[in-house]
Image: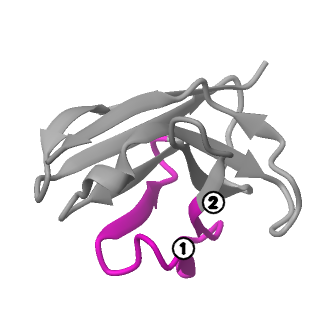
Amino acid sequence: QVQLEESGGGSVQAGGSLRLSCAASGRSLNAYARHWFRQAPGKEREFISWISVSGARTYYADSVKGRFTISRDNAKNTVYLQMNSLKPEDTGVYYCAAARTLGSDPDYWGQGTQVTVSS
């Protein structure tokens, strides 16, 4: 059974940084595109970023472009999200996910980690 476990969330002041990690267990996800999503209070879950299998390609939502960086370490079966210049509107629960086929709905989801940015 595949499990994705996020970590690294917390509370930070605006302008600060956090680094989220998402470790996979149960099987290797090295052949899967990895994603980050977030859900703000009272809003639908939104896409944040993805990274290709090799890590050579990345994509970001406009709302985080230039501030967030996604990366992966296939040896550790882990994906990361470095978040800099955080804003209060970045507050929410952050979820990692994995999709066998890029562009399709993810096959696996983590339980989420809370990020709170205060002004």
Helix, strand or loop under label 2: strand
Q: Nearer the viewer, residue 117 or 23?
A: 117
In the figure, is residue 92 to the left or right of 103?
Answer: left
Q: Name the residue at 15% across, 39% down.
A: 12
The region drawn magenta spans 48-76
Q: Name the residue at 83% across, 69% down.
A: 103
Query: What is the x, y in percent for residue 35?
Result: 61, 55
Q: Of the residues under marks 2 and 1, which one precedes in the sequence?
A: 2
Helix, strand or loop under label 1: loop
For this orientation, the residue located farthest to the top is: 1
In the figure, is residue 67 to the left or right of 103?
Answer: left
Quarter of the figure with the N terminus: top right
Residue 119 magenta-drawn?
Answer: no
What's the colour scheme? Answer: one colour
In the figure, is residue 86 to the left or right of 31?
Answer: left
Q: Name the residue at 11% across, 53% down.
A: 16
Q: Residues within 10 Å of mark 1 (few under 14, many from 20)?
A: some
Please tell me whether residue 30 is drawn above or below residue 116 in the rendered image: below
| Number of marks present in the image shown | 2
Residue 67 magenta-drawn?
Answer: yes
Give yes or no for contact between labels 2 and 1 (Cβ–Cβ under 8 Å): yes
Which residue does the numbered mark 2 point to in the structure image?
A: 47
Q: Which three-letter amino acid code belongs to the residue tagged 1?
A: Ala
- Label of residue 61 in the image: 1
Q: Nearer the viewer, residue 81 or 84?
A: 84
- Label of residue 80 in the image: none
Q: Residues within 10 Å of mark 2 (few under 14, many from 20)?
A: some
Query: What is the x, y in percent for residue 36?
Result: 56, 52
Query: What is the x, y in percent for residue 2?
Result: 73, 25
Q: Which three-letter amino acid code belongs to the residue tagged 2?
A: Phe
Q: Name the residue at 23% across, 57% down.
A: 86
In the figure, is residue 117 to the left or right of 30?
Answer: left
